[in-house]
Image (spheres, helix red, strand yellow):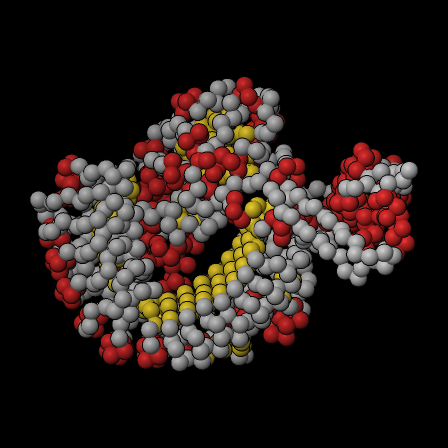
């Protein structure tokens, strides 16, 4: 006898009209449709493959190889999904004999997935690629120098890749003397693991080490590469790396690195052959002993200096060939100069660049007349050779190079600020001119191979070049302690011996975690520059400290824990530069008025600075740069006095009233923090800084309750960061005869919180935007409406974010779409969405994204996304917001369970609405 539920279901099936209810009762019909649709797709796939393997196309190039490859991959994925769904259906989730299973949800899920797959398969059939072949073009000629010089490097790359493919090898060491090319090889290995040749590694982490680097610094770098918080610990790093394939590239380690302490799953050889994942570590070092301690065993590569033919090829690549090949005698002298470099690639490159503008034999003979010979492994003999690149620079750029060498790892802006403070930039009309001068200097140093810049814009130089700079600073080794550059470990004390060395020092630069400054018992009359950065353990400066250094001109204690400046700072009557940024100092002492030569007063990010002592600034009549951003301010009367001095080149501060804002409009502002201007209903950009000398770099507008319009007008800005926060009435951003990409050519960070803006279409095409954060804007329905953007910018190019790395969206209740067209975001790596419940589609389509995008979101939101292109989801790696430090493992019991309960209210009429209860359980 048929059961009552079956009777009930069979009675009402003919009345079912809603799509979601048909999923429950027409499961077999949809499965049959899926089988037929897949059968046609497989026939199409076989046709494509037959064309690909047609013998008549042998020796030809497929025009759209990537498109065909992606299509075949997608077909394979659909085939796997269909097989899994058919298998699930066949295991009895739905009874095929015509009766109805009590598990309505299983029927619903299978039917819905079948329906979705049918749509995706039909789309694939539409996208079937055309098969076209063309003749392979003849290979381009490779310059002989590139063939020869690259031979060893590429051979070693192949060796390392073979090690990576070997399941029994986990740690690989590369060693050799400084400048021999270890870092170049490691970068080539990293490049070889990009794109389709990445050997299945999800994470390829390149970390630059240095002498004395601590575990915390290593962890911070690794966390940044993994898009974790900078405070992430070893457990957080381990949780990300352990369940994935990764290769860690450690460049330039000087001692054994404890991988376990870093959170790196140690790639023990005995475990690798049975491990589910590939865990590999490759490192470079100058020491063979470090290779042994790291456990590389026999899996090491020793980098040797180049043979004569390779060395000559590299040398020729960096000099002026037309000059040295113009005469056989010249060529012979050039060969002899090349031989003096001892085959060391760094020396060949640096000396070659230095000699590239020397056009007479006499210039070249200067190098030959040097008594120095390069002895492999002995840098003292190499430094005079490298010094020719330094001697080739103008005097002022030489000094800039030596200064930058002590600040490696710093940003360009920090280096420029130091150059200005030491008087190395010279006089400048405005800050823009200073930046222009600095850019030229950076370019010359980079062209001379003395400096290079990381992807983050940090200044770096090779260790051997750094040793050369320190050697030059010590008068070529004659005055050992002329410059003291030292890093202290973990609250170490400055020893008596170190204190004694200050007596003859010209410059002292100390970093690290030192806690106490010495009570100097002797005069340091030669000390001109004192930098003590980064030690939050350092809380005070002893009384009488400044009396011992009467000629000090440059003093920098930024990033320390110092709470106040002692009164004897008034003894520094020659001081020109003072930097107390990011310390615990809450007020500026009135004794600063005695520093009559002070030109730079840098007090950024002092939490409780507030109003500066009255008349303090106006009495320092030589001030050029005042930076008390974002908490410090001076009253309008003080600003009026400052306007009388032509010396002011830049000022950054908090704006606490309309009167202050009015006075600042005639001064060259660089950073403004505008807060609580209760009566301002619009702001115009051309009033935020002096029209002739303005160089506004950072702007934050916060809590201005009446502000409704922001007018973009005037000349292009130099803004790097713009934050609009809690401006609840802001409805319009108006563009007056300017285009966003021209007005904001350098804008890198943009944050908009709590306002009434309905669109931010103008953000499209900002050429340098890296970080975009939009939150709590209740009126936004679409972030980037391309039609609006074209009205503003009058351009027809497709929208793109060439440099965007981070996109964060939160609390946008009306947001339905991010963009109405696909966005090109080639560098996007971090995407966060929170409480945007109406956002159903993402603008990331196949072929747009290079690599994986880490997506932080609510799981429920992720589960309900609609994909226009199903393959797009493969480019995104979802992470739960509450597990932002470790990715979830996608196991069956981790998914949300949903129980669907259908209630029937009457017979035979089906209710017009269904009641659905979603019960979320983990």
Q: Nearer the viewer, residue 366 or 808?
A: 808
Q: Quadrant of the rendered structure where residue 808 is?
A: bottom right
Q: Position of residue 790 (x, y in %)?
A: 64, 72
Q: Residue at the location (34% across, 72% down)?
A: 655
Residue 830 appears left or right of 446: right
Residue 194 seen in render: no
Q: Residue at the location (52% across, 44% down)?
A: 883
State which quarter of the image contains the C terminus: top right
Q: Residue at the location (68% across, 62% down)?
A: 821
Residue 185 appears left or right of 359: right
Residue 281 lies, with reference to residue 600, above or below; the image says: above
State which quarter of the image contains the N terminus: top right
Q: Nearer the viewer, residue 651 or 189?
A: 651
Q: Position of residue 704 (x, y in %)?
A: 42, 74
Residue 900 seen in render: yes
Q: Nearer the viewer, residue 591 or 332?
A: 591
Q: Residue at the location (14% across, 37% down)?
A: 496
Q: Position of residue 575 (x, y in %)?
A: 19, 59
Residue 599 lies, with reference to residue 666, above or below; the image says: above
Q: Nearer the viewer, residue 843 or 308?
A: 843
Q: Position of residue 814 (x, y in %)?
A: 61, 66
Count of numbered labels shown in the rendering: 0
């Amino acid at each position: 006898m048929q059961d009552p539920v079956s009777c009930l279901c069979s009675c009402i099936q003919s009345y079912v009209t809603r799509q979601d209810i048909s999923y429950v009762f027409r499961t077999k019909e949809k499965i049959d449709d899926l089988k037929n649709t897949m059968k046609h797709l497989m026939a199409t796939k076989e046709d494509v493959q037959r064309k690909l393997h047609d013998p008549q196309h042998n020796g030809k190039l497929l025009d759209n190889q990537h498109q065909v490859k992606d299509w075949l991959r997608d077909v394979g994925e659909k085939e796997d999904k269909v097989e899994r769904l058919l298998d699930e259906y066949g295991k009895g989730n739905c009874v095929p004999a015509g009766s109805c299973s009590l598990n309505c949800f299983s029927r619903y899920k299978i039917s819905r997935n079948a329906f979705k797959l049918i749509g995706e398969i039909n789309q694939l059939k539409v996208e079937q690629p055309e098969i076209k072949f063309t003749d392979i073009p003849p290979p381009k000629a490779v310059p002989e120098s590139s063939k020869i010089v690259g031979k060893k490097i590429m051979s070693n790359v192949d060796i390392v890749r073979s090690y990576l493919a070997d399941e029994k090898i986990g740690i690989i060491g590369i060693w050799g003397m400084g400048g021999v090319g270890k870092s170049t090889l490691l970068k080539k290995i990293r490049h070889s693991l990009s794109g389709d040749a990445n050997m299945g590694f999800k994470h390829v982490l390149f970390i630059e080490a240095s002498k004395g680097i601590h575990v915390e610094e290593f962890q911070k770098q690794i966390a940044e590469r993994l898009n974790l918080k900078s405070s992430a610990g070893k457990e957080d790093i381990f949780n990300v790396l352990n369940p994935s394939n990764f290769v860690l590239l450690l460049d330039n380690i000087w001692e054994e690195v404890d991988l376990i302490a870093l959170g790196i799953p140690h790639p023990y050889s005995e475990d690798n052959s049975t491990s589910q994942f590939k865990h590999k570590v490759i490192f470079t070092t100058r020491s063979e002993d470090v290779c042994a301690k790291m456990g590389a065993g026999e899996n090491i590569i020793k980098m040797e200096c180049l043979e004569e033919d390779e060395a000559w090829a590299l040398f020729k690549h960096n000099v002026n060939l037309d000059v040295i090949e113009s005469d056989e005698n010249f060529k012979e002298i050039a060969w002899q100069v090349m031989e003096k470099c001892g085959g060391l690639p760094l020396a060949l490159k640096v000396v070659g660049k230095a000699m590239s503008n020397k056009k007479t034999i006499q210039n070249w003979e200067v190098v030959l007349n040097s008594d120095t010979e390069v002895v492999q492994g002995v840098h003292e003999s190499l430094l005079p050779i490298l010094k020719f690149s330094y001697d080739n620079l103008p005097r002022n750029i030489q000094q800039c190079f030596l200064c930058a060498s002590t600040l490696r790892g710093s940003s360009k802006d920090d280096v420029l600020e130091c150059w200005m403070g030491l008087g190395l930039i010279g006089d400048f009309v405005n800050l823009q001119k200073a930046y222009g001068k600095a850019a030229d200097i950076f370019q010359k140093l980079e062209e001379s191979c003395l400096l290079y810049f990381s992807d983050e814009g940090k200044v770096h130089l090779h260790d051997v070049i750094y040793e050369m700079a320190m050697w030059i600073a010590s008068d070529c080794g004659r005055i050992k302690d002329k410059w003291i550059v030292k890093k202290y470990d973990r609250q170490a004390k400055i020893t008596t011996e170190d204190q004694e060395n200050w007596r003859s020092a010209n410059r002292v630069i100390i970093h690290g975690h030192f806690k106490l400054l010495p009570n100097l018992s002797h005069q340091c009359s030669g000390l001109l520059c004192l930098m003590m950065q980064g030690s939050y353990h350092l809380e005070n400066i002893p009384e009488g400290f400044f009396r011992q250094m009467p000629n000090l001109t440059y003093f920098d204690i930024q990033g320390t824990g110092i709470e106040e400046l002692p009164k004897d700072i008034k003894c520094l009557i020659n001081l020109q530069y003072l930097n107390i940024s990011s310390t615990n100092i809450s007020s500026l002492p009135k004794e600063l008025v005695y520093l009559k030569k002070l030109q730079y007063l840098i007090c950024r990010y002092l939490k409780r600075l507030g109003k500066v002592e009255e008349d303090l600034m106006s009495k320092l009549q030589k001030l050029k740069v005042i930076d008390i951003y974002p908490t410090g301010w001076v009253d309008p009367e003080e600003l009026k006095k400052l306007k009388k001095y032509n010396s002011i080149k830049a000022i950054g501060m908090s704006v606490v009233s309309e009167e202050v804002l009015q006075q600042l409009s005639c001064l060259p502002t660089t950073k403004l923090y505008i807060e609580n201007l209760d009566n301002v209903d619009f702001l115009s950009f051309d009033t935020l800084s002096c029209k002739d000398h303005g160089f506004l770099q950072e702007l934050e507008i916060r809590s201005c309750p009446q502000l409704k319009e922001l007018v973009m007008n005037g000349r292009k800005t130099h803004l790097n960061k713009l934050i609009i926060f809690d401006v609840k009435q802001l409805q319009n951003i108006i563009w007056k005869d300017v285009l966003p990409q021209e007005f904001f050519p350098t804008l890198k960070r943009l944050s908009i919180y709590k306002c009434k803006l309905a669109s931010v279409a103008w953000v499209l095409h900002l050429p340098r935007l890296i970080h975009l954060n939009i939150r709590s804007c209740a009126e936004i329905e679409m972030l980037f409406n391309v039609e609006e953007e074209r009205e503003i910018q009058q351009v027809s190019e497709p929208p793109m974010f060439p440099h965007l790395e981070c996109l964060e969206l939160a609390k946008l209740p009306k947001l339905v779409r991010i963009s109405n067209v696909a966005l090109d975001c080639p560098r996007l790596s971090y995407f966060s969405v929170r409480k945007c419940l109406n956002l159903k589609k993402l603008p990331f389509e196949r072929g747009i994204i290079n690599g994986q995008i880490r997506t932080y979101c609510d799981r429920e939101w992720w589960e309900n996304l609609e994909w226009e292109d199903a393959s797009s989801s493969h480019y995104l790696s979802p992470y739960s917001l509450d597990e932002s430090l470790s990715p979830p493992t996608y196991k069956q019991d981790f998914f949300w369970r949903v129980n669907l309960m259908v209630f029937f209210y009457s017979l035979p009429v089906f209710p017009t609405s269904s009641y659905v209860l979603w019960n979320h359980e983990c």
